[in-house]
Amino acid sequence: MSDTTASPPVPRRALVVVDVQPTFCEGGELAVDGGDQVARDVAAYVAAHRGRYALVVTTQDWHVDPGDHFSDTPDFVDSWPPHGIAGTPNAELHPALADLHPDVSVKKGQYAHGYSGFEGTDDDGRTLEQALRDARIEAADVVGLVESHCVKRTALDAAGLGLATRVLTDLTIPVSPEQGEQARRELTAAGVELGPSTA
């Protein structure tokens, strides 16, 4: 007789750590208050819970010549001060992530805005989608900087690919409370789950 009380299989899950770089933290070119704390919290979370994940991915803004994404007179909507400049220390992963050792590292935005991690590639030229497919990933948790922009875009793209997607709300931060509220509305509407990492 079959056991009808058996739990469903646990999906193969990836953790996508978005743009946790000094350029977005206190003292960086496009700093968000609380960025350093997010970096420390993400590092502590991964150290404690890496076993939950079949794959840990990092993304980085790695701008070479992103066109009108950079501006000397930015509107902070479609254009921004130069940040995440390829090859500079502030474009590297935050020092708090020194022991993270991601399975996949994606760089994005070399010649475009590159808000979503799915617009980037790893050192082998694979897109983030291909890296997740290669690892047979079925679900993704998205964390990092910042909730209202690159975290949101990455999570929306993950959901659009059919992955069961969550944003861990205590491991990200928006540019402003208002933009955070708007991002959460968009994510919820797209079927992205929002909740704390302790759930």
Image (cartoon, rainbow, N blue to C red):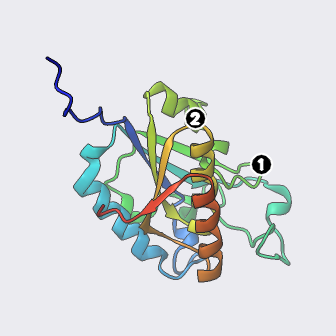
Q: In which image quadrant can residue 61 be found?
A: bottom right
Q: In which image quadrant can residue 127 be found?
A: top right
Q: Relative to residue 23, is residue 58 depicted above or below?
A: above
Report, in whole angstroms, how far the alpha carbon at label 1 lies from the one at label 2: 19 Å
Pick whichever of labels 1 and 2 is earlier in the sequence: 1
- Give, as a three-letter code, the residue at label 2: Glu
Instruction: Give the number of the disc on residue 129.
Output: 2
Q: Which residue is the site of mark 1?
A: 111
Q: Residues within 10 Å of mark 2 (few under 14, many from 20)?
A: some
Residue 27, x across and y down, in percent: 54, 80
Q: Relative to residue 6, is residue 180 depicted above or below?
A: below
| Count of numbered labels shown in the rendering | 2
Residue closest to the eye, 106 or 13: 13
Tag 1's secondary structure?
A: loop
- Give, as a three-letter code, the residue at label 1: Tyr
Residue 6, x across and y down, in percent: 20, 32
Residue closest to the eye, 178 or 60: 178
The structure residue drawn at horizontal position 59% and vertical position 46%, both measured from the top left corner, is 107
Tag 2's secondary structure?
A: helix
Q: Which residue is the extreme one toward the left?
A: 1
Q: Which residue is the extreme one toward the front?
A: 1
Q: Quadrant of the N terminus?
A: top left
Q: In which image quadrant can residue 151 be found?
A: bottom right
